[in-house]
Image (cartoon, grey):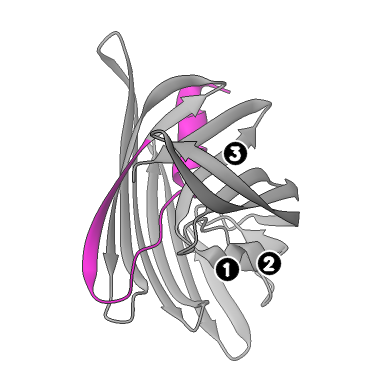
Amino acid sequence: MTKARLIVCLLLVACGAGPAGAHTENLFGAIHIDGRKAGQIHYTVDYGDGGDVETLRTRASLSILGVKLFNFEQTLHETWHHGELRRFRGRTDDNGTVYDAVLDRGPGGYTATLNGKPVVLPADAFPASVWHHGIADHTLLFDLKTFALMRVKIAKTPETLTIDKRKIPTERFDLTGDWQATAWFDARKRLVRFRYVLDGHEVVVRLDD
């Protein structure tokens, strides 16, 4: 698994939640792979009047000695209501491989397609959107790029992080099973750090304050 591929998998799930009200946020963070800084991430998030995410755009590139090795672009359109994903439109260009994902939720559950082909998702599955604190309450998740299902167990513990010499009390959620990950949320339920294990490599995103 290349470093570029590791970064892609991280970008699909790491994002911070914002306050209520229509606004746009630009979020930045540093990516570390196996303890070494490997690059930066930049998210542009548009929120609607109710504070729900309407669009999320992510762009990233990995360069070594000034040579661009990899491109990744993703546009997500999400509609949430009472903590439930009701409508989703996503397009991901993963270094030339395109994933067009469409999802709607009605009384009978999800209706979804990936690149025009139907995908079956259980009604109790929750999107693997780490920015949403509700992820900590669900043990069946689905990936927003491929709609792959992931069964997890979740352990919650308090932990104080040191960020820029400041002590920040957080809730730490460790996910195990089909997805090896850890997410830290502050008192406002904002994501402040995310760790993800992929093919034996540790990937960490540290969001700027």
Residue 87 to residue 172: above or below = below
In this picture, residue 115 sits left or right of residue 41? right
- Image quadrant assignment for residue 87: bottom left
> Residue at left 75%, top 47%?
176
> Residue at left 57%, top 45%?
160
Q: Residue furthest bottom?
A: 107
| Kind of residue sitting beneath label 1 | Gly
- The part of the chain drawn in magenta is 1-29
| Residue 68 covered by magenta stretch | no
Residue 208 is situated, as x and y percent measured from the top left of the image, at 34, 42
- Image quadrant assignment for residue 19: bottom left
| Residue 6 covered by magenta stretch | yes
Q: Which mark is residue 134?
A: 1
| Kind of residue sitting beneath label 2 | His
Q: CA distance from mark 3 to mark 1?
A: 18 Å
According to the picture, the residue beneath numbered tag 3 turns out to be 196
> Residue at left 23%, top 74%?
22
In this picture, residue 128 sits left or right of residue 72? right
Q: Are marks 2 and 1 in contact (CB under 8 Å)?
A: yes
- Whichever of callouts 3 and 2 sits on the residue coming sooner in the sequence is 2
Element under disc 1: helix
| Kind of residue sitting beneath label 3 | Tyr
Q: CA distance from mark 3 to mark 2?
A: 17 Å
> Residue at left 62%, top 25%?
201
Residue 50 is situated, as x and y percent measured from the top left of the image, at 33, 81
